[in-house]
Image (spheres, rainbow, N blue to C red):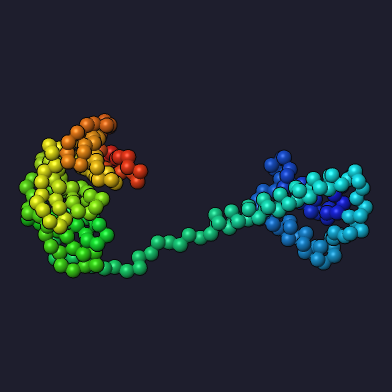
Amino acid sequence: MRLNPGLPAELERIINKALEKDRDVRCQSAAEIRADLKRLKRDTDSGQAPAFSLATAATTTGKEAPAQQYWSKWAVLFAAVVIVAGVLVVWLRWPVSSARVLGLTQVTNDGSTKVPPALTDGLRLYYMTGFQAYVLYQVSVTGGGAAPISEPFPGVYTQLNGISPSGSELLVEVGDSTGEGPLWVVPTLMGSSHRLGSIVCSGASWSPDGQTIAFAKGSTLNLARSDGSGAHTILTVNGTPSWIRWSPRGSASHQRSAVI
């Protein structure tokens, strides 16, 4: 006995197939359900399948009415599931456009060797040169003449470690043969450079609020106030922490050199 004589038998078959408990018998994809529904519409329009009629609906008895309402609700739910599944399939299969280089702009033309990384505040680009001595330079991000913003740094190597959230100061590590060295703060506009407390490290980074500095020393990850005071270890790892960066929420994160 059919639970809802008002629905085409083929539609009930599709619904029952979609709700089948046995996964091997159940519809395997939204595409299969869509194909069955399109086939039913085609057969109904061509007269090959019986369409819904008021005369047929009138034969529903009072005992069958609750069942009809039950299956009508399931039919609506089924249609909603099909629509959602179809949208998900289209979204998941929508081709993602590949990244493209739209243009190149030469920023510097001095021919000097640049020591990575280069940092920016959005308007200016800061970088270190290492031809005869390590010197910090700045240049507009749109290009033009580069200008030095520091005296030559002493040491075996010098590395630009970070830029303050305000963009007014740069963190510079002046290292020696041990791979570590003192931290210096270099103003980007006016003022003199100064050493940051007694910190000796192999890498450092400002927190997003500019109040804390995370730095690596040996196999430890450490925190200190922005003036270099209050230094303390928060983590010891197997290896040397390097390329220290902060998460957007302000917690320090790091990667070991063995991973990089």
Q: Position of residue 11 (x, y in %)?
A: 79, 53
The spot of residue 253 in percent (x, y) is 31, 40
Can residue 129 be seen from the camera position used here?
no
Q: Quadrant of the C terminus?
A: top left
- Tally of numbered discs: 0
Residue at image coords 71%, 58%: 35
Percent x, y of residue 169 = 18, 51
Task: Between residue 45 and residue 191, name the one nearer to us.
Answer: 191
Q: Is residue 102 above or below residue 81?
A: below
For residue 46, above or below residue 201: below
Occupied quadrant, residue 110: bottom left
Q: Using residue 29 as the reference point, say whether residue 128 is left or right of it.
A: left
The residue nearer to you, when weighing 92 against 64, is 64
Q: Is residue 249 left or right of residue 11?
A: left
In this view of the protein, which residue sits in the foreground, 43 or 137? 137
Image-based side of 105 in relation to 194, left or right: right
Query: In the image, what residue occupies the spot 29% across and 46% down?
Result: 208
* Residue lying at 75% horizontally and 51% vertically, measured from the top left: 75
Residue 7 spot, x, y in % from top left: 83, 54
Depth check, front residue: 190 or 1: 190
Placement of the N terminus among the 4 image quadrants: top right
Q: Is residue 100 visible?
A: yes
Instruction: Residue at 63% x, 53% y: name it.
Output: 84
